Image (spheres, grey):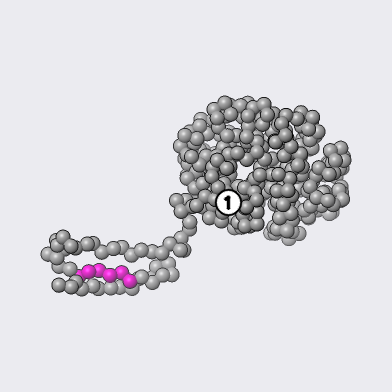
């Protein structure tokens, strides 16, 4: 006997469904041919992409072998919006000088001053324009695990090759909390952990990193800013580590076995930083660029870098507050440094300028 069905229309999240229930007697239910009704299947086209649906566009091993990664600067228009034309020029100059990867929206790129919509848009733009020529590593870290998960889902969905994650800052957590935080995002794809206690107020102790190495095959390595003693500890345990300090990266690379550097200075002198990472031990070159690196970090990064790029004419002299340009005395010192090192080693081909204080635009609302 054919079974009868009663059906109802259900409206859910913009989709119409017909949910049907079989009118079958209890005796028929006991028949071996009876099957329970299937639940309505909700199409997931409107749902956010989840980590298990990600298709990595590169392998963890491809990330682990990168020698020179630039924490790329984000330039602005006078109204504070992204200057994508200038940004594309900056990325192209990195590629032309042999840089292998870029961090998008990191501290240097002022991700902390972006909305998440801006952040993910810039990652997607970088992937679409340059993803075939350079590895795009999106800074999708946060002190909120929920935000870090969501941003990483979106970042991998738009095609970033790897994620950069910092430990929770300000509202600091325990060692166990750090492990749980990082474990929540490592499942999504290749990930670099970033340790910079001077900014977060909390060190990521080596046992945390060692635990993550054992737990996840997506752990690519660590950007370490504590110093070369920590670099030596990790390389001694065969853990991939990038120096996060431009002034120490030569020794990290050639004396202590670091994979390379995640660099700020390479925004300005990518060719010389490439030579430092690929050309073998070169203490003379280190001594040549060290005064510039020290100048860059006289004030918190990216103040020095933003000022220098504006003086080189490769970006507009626009600052999103709370960052402001270096004073004129330091701008004059930068001109002297460029002349000592050689203008030809710096990006761009425009005339180097000191700039006047009123040339700079400071934007508080954008």
The residue at the point 86 percent across, 48 percent down is: 352
User: Which quadrant of the view contains residue 32?
Assistant: bottom left
- Above or below residue 276? Residue 142 is below
Q: Position of residue 364 (x, y in %)?
A: 71, 55
Question: Would you say 13 lies left or right of 6 here?
Answer: right
Q: Residues within 10 Å of mark 1 (few under 14, many from 20)?
A: many
Residue that badge 1 annotates:
160
Residue 166 against residue 4 in the figure, above or below: above
Residue at point 67%, 26% (across, down) = 255
The residue depicted at 83 percent of the width and 51 percent of the height is 349
Which residue corresponds to the image point at 49% horizontal and 47% vertical from the top-left? 188
Residue 238: image location, x then y, percent: 55, 30
- Residue 157 visible to the viewer: yes
Please, what is the dominant secondary structure of the magenta stretch?
Answer: strand
Residue 236 belongs to the span the image colors magenta? no
Residue found farthest to the left:
27
Say which of 66 and 183 sits in front. 66
Residue at disc 1, secondary structure: loop
3 on left or right of 208: left
Q: Quadrant of the image for the C terminus?
A: bottom right
Q: Which residues are magenta?
A: 18-23
Q: Position of residue 147 (x, y in %)?
A: 53, 50
Instruction: Note whether 330 is above or below 318 in the view shown.
Output: above
Quadrant for the N terminus, please: bottom left
- In the image, 325 versus 139, the foreground residue is 139
Residue 145 in sight here? no
User: x, y percentage for residue 138?
Assistant: 60, 49
Q: Is residue 20 magenta?
A: yes
């Amino acid at each position: 006997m054919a079974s009868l069905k009663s059906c109802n229309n259900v409206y859910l999240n913009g989709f119409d469904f017909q949910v049907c229930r079989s009118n079958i007697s209890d005796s028929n239910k006991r028949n071996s041919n009876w099957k329970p009704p299937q639940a309505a299947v909700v199409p997931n086209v409107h749902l956010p992409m989840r980590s298990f649906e990600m298709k990595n566009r590169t392998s963890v091993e491809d990330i682990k072998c990168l020698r020179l990664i630039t924490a790329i600067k984000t330039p602005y228009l006078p109204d504070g919006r992204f200057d994508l034309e200038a940004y594309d020029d900056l990325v192209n100059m990195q590629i032309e000088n042999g840089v292998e990867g870029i961090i998008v929206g990191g501290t240097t790129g002022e991700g902390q001053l972006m909305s998440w919509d801006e952040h993910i848009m810039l990652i997607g733009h970088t992937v679409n324009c340059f993803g075939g020529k350079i590895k795009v590593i999106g800074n999708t870290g946060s002190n909120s695990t929920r935000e870090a998960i969501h941003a990483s889902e979106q970042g991998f969905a738009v095609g970033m090759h790897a994620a950069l994650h910092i430990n929770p800052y300000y509202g600091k957590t325990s060692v166990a909390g750090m492990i749980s935080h990082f474990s929540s995002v490592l499942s999504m794809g290749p990930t670099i952990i970033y340790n910079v206690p001077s900014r977060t107020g909390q060190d990521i102790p080596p046992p945390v990193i060692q635990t993550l190495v054992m737990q996840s095959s997506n752990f690519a390595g660590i950007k370490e800013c504590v110093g070369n003693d920590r670099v030596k500890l990790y390389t001694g345990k065969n853990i991939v580590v990038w120096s996060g300090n431009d002034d120490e990266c030569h020794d990290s690379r050639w004396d202590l076995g670091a994979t390379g550097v995640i660099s700020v200075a390479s925004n300005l002198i990518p060719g010389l930083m490439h030579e430092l990472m690929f050309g073998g031990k070169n203490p003379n070159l280190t001594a040549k660029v060290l005064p510039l690196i020290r100048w860059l970090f006289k004030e918190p990064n990216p103040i020095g870098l933003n000022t220098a790029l504006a003086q080189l004419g490769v970006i507009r002299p626009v600052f999103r507050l709370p960052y402001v340009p270096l004073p004129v005395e330091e701008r004059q010192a930068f001109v002297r440094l460029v002349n000592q090192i050689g203008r030809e080693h710096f990006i761009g081909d425009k005339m180097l300028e000191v700039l006047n204080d009123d040339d700079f635009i400071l934007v508080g609302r954008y």
